[in-house]
Image: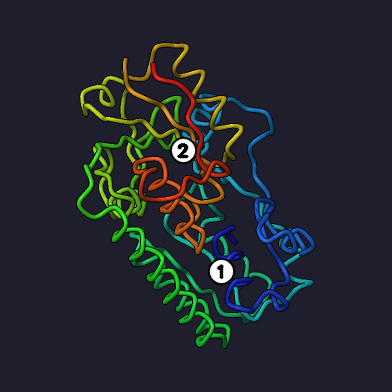
């Protein structure tokens, strides 16, 4: 019921057993061949401001942000449904999943994973691996992820620690919370907006300037690198980002906002931005846009 869970399932070796995915599940590519069981209630082509307004309206009126295909659930008759209760904007509400399963008479187990920190994301890999009979592979993945993070920390140890503002949404601006501040710390920076383990918060561009960041990272949820670059340019052209501060864009969906194994790629890419002399840059995941 969420892209990160799909990624984890394939990574731990349970990909052949994945029968249903969301419309957003695009990694690995094989996930696209599975039955789509949930789709967005939002229309395509909306601007960030329009999306924010529509989400707020639907939540206020108690309307769903996703459509759950109960017919698909009936056909699949899943033994296990992996979902989350962390963010109403990220996936079908867990209560809706439970209600649908009960209504359809499906007796499968619903596993809810709600990691809030980077360590909890890694732990969730083991949780999902264990639930699907792939604990050994899951523990191997978790170990490798930890080793890669440790390698980045060693590489940046003793270097200057820049202040980093990670903006998860641009109109209106939101600072990135949950595991993203942990990622900044692991990459050798300090997150000046957003707190580890806490929700992303709506802020203002004045708040960004007041935080006096050395760098602004545009990491819009639901966008790939090209879209992030476009939004970053719009913010710069509108004189929203702090003057004299370099602005970077990152591939949020690939390596920042989906709590799965590829967050480690995001840490490595961010370290390459903050400390290119110590960590090899990843232009596929992060690109310099301009200095406002």
Looking at the rendered image, the quarter that the N terminus falls into is: bottom right
Residue 164 appears at what percent x and percent y? 30, 37
Mark 1 lies on a secondary structure that is helix
Looking at the rendered image, the quarter that the C terminus falls into is: top left
Residue 264 appears at what percent x and percent y? 45, 59
Residue position marked by numbered label 1 in the rendering: 8
**Does residue 238 sit above or below 25 in this rendering?**
above
Which corner quadrant of the image does residue 222 belong to?
Answer: top right
Report the number of numbered marks. Answer: 2
Q: Is residue 167 left or right of residue 52?
A: left
Q: Dot 1 surroundings within 10 Å: few (below 14), some, or many (20 or more)?
A: many
Measured in 3D between alpha carbons, the distance from the residue under mark 2 to the one under mark 1, in whole angstroms, is: 21 Å
Residue drawn at x 51%, y 18% is 234
Tell me the number on the disc at residue 288.
Answer: none
Q: Is residue 22 left or right of residue 136?
A: right
Residue position marked by numbered label 2 in the rendering: 219
Question: Camera-side residue: 140 or 272?
Answer: 272
Question: Camera-side residue: 287 or 43?
Answer: 287
Q: Is residue 271 left or right of residue 185?
A: right
């Amino acid at each position: 019921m969420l892209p990160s869970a799909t990624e984890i399932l394939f990574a731990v070796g349970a990909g052949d057993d994945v029968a249903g995915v969301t419309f957003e599940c695009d990694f690995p590519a094989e996930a696209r061949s599975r039955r789509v069981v949930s789709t967005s209630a939002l229309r395509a082509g909306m601007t960030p401001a329009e999306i924010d307004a529509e989400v707020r309206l639907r939540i206020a009126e108690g309307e769903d942000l996703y459509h759950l295909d109960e017919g698909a659930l009936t056909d699949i008759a899943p033994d296990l449904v992996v979902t989350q209760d962390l963010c109403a904007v990220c996936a079908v509400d867990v209560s809706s999943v439970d209600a649908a399963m009960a209504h359809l008479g499906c007796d499968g187990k619903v596993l809810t994973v709600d990691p809030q920190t980077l360590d909890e994301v890694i732990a969730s890999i083991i949780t999902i691996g264990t639930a699907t009979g792939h604990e050994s592979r899951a523990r191997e993945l978790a170990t490798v992820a930890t080793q890669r993070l440790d390698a980045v920390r060693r590489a940046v140890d003793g270097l200057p620690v820049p202040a980093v503002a990670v903006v998860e949404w641009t109109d209106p601006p939101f600072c990135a919370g949950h595991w993203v501040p942990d990622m900044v710390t692991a990459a050798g920076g300090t997150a000046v907006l957003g707190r580890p383990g806490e929700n992303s918060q709506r802020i203002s561009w004045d708040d960004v300037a007041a935080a006096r960041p050395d760098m602004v990272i545009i990491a819009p949820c639901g966008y790939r690198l090209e879209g992030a670059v476009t939004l970053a340019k719009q913010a710069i052209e509108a004189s929203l980002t702090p003057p004299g501060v370099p602005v970077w864009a990152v591939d949020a969906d690939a390596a920042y906002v989906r709590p799965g194994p590829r967050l480690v790629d995001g840490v490595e890419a961010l370290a390459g931005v903050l400390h290119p002399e110590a960590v090899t840059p990843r232009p596929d995941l992060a690109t310099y846009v301009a200095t406002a």
